[in-house]
Amino acid sequence: MNDQPDNPVREAIAAAISEHDVILFMKGTPEAPACGFSARTVATLQALDAPFAAVDVLGDPRIRQELSAISQWPTIPQLFVHGELVGGCDIVTEMFESGELAGLLGVEGRAVASETGDISGAGALQIENRL
Amino acid sequence: MPQADEIRSRIEAAIPGARAEVEDWTGGGDHFRATVTSPAFAGLSRIEQHRLVYRIFGEEIGGPIHALSLTTRSE
């Protein structure tokens, strides 16, 4: 990269959001969530067999700060689908119960082999590599 | 430490026509659950509705208020 970004952390987050169809910023990892709200959001995505990338915001305090600046959303977790903030645990749970989430994720009535582990690993790594 | 009553009155004062029910989720004074009804939410997405509420508390969310779980309704 020749251009020196003003804010590399923010740019890395923005790039990760645009590169992954479904990306969850959470506390901890999908395998070991560090907060009940993150755990519930992961469980919801897994219940739909929806593949998602995951980024652990606890890896670096700047991630949370810059993420909230981008999203104008104060809390973690934050789920983005196709580059747009869907919401945190409350909204994700509400949309799961209403069936909207399955529609948004394109997983209605379709069982997808879970690639969650691999993809989440890549997502977390990607952010860290760019810091 | 914020109290459920204080959070309720701040929401009702800040959002036109809002009625809020707030409970202290854990009894610890830092995890709250609120249901907010206001005509001001009409036409807004869920994200925008929740942002209106979160904005009232600014930096307190994630600080003294660890979690404010929200359900918002427009009618």
Image (cartoon, coloured by chain):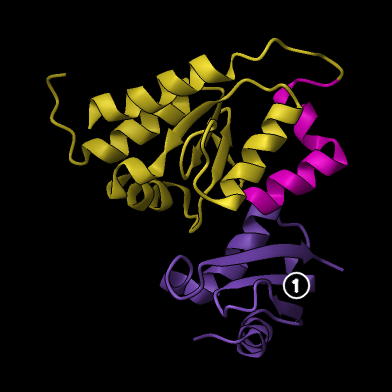
Q: Position of residue A120 (x, y in %)?
A: 49, 23
Which residue occupies the foreground of this view, A28 or B35? A28
Q: Residue at x 52, y 69 (%)?
A: B55
Decide: is A71 above or below B70: above
Specify whether B7 is left or right of A34. Answer: right
Q: Position of residue B63 (x, y in %)?
A: 42, 70
Q: Which chain is purple?
A: B
Q: Position of residue A64 (x, y in %)?
A: 38, 49
Decide: is A112 above or below A38: above
Q: Residue at x 63, y 57 (%)?
A: B48
Q: Residue at x 18, y 34 (%)?
A: A5
The answer to whether residue A35 is magenta is: no
Q: Is residue B4 visible?
A: yes
Decide: is A69 above or below B35: above
> Residue A3: which quarter of the image?
top left
Q: Residue at x 76, y 57 (%)?
A: B43
Which residue occupies the foreground of this view, A28 or A66? A28
Chain A: colour as depicted: yellow
- Per the rendered image, the range of residues in magenta is A88-108
Which residue occupies the foreground of this view, A53 or A58? A58
Residue at the far front in the pictured view: A32
Mark 1 Cα shell of 10 Å, populated few (<14), some (14-19), many (≥20): many
Give the quadrant of the C terminus of chain A.
top left
Specify whether B70 is left or right of A18. Answer: right
The residue tagged 1 is: B36
Which residue occupies the foreground of this view, B10 or A77? A77
**Which amino acid type is shown beneath numbered disc 1?**
Val
Q: Is residue B45 visible?
A: no
Q: Position of residue A93 (x, y in %)?
A: 74, 46
Give the quadrant of the N terminus of chain A.
top left
The chain carrying label 1 is B
> Residue A82: which quarter of the image?
top right
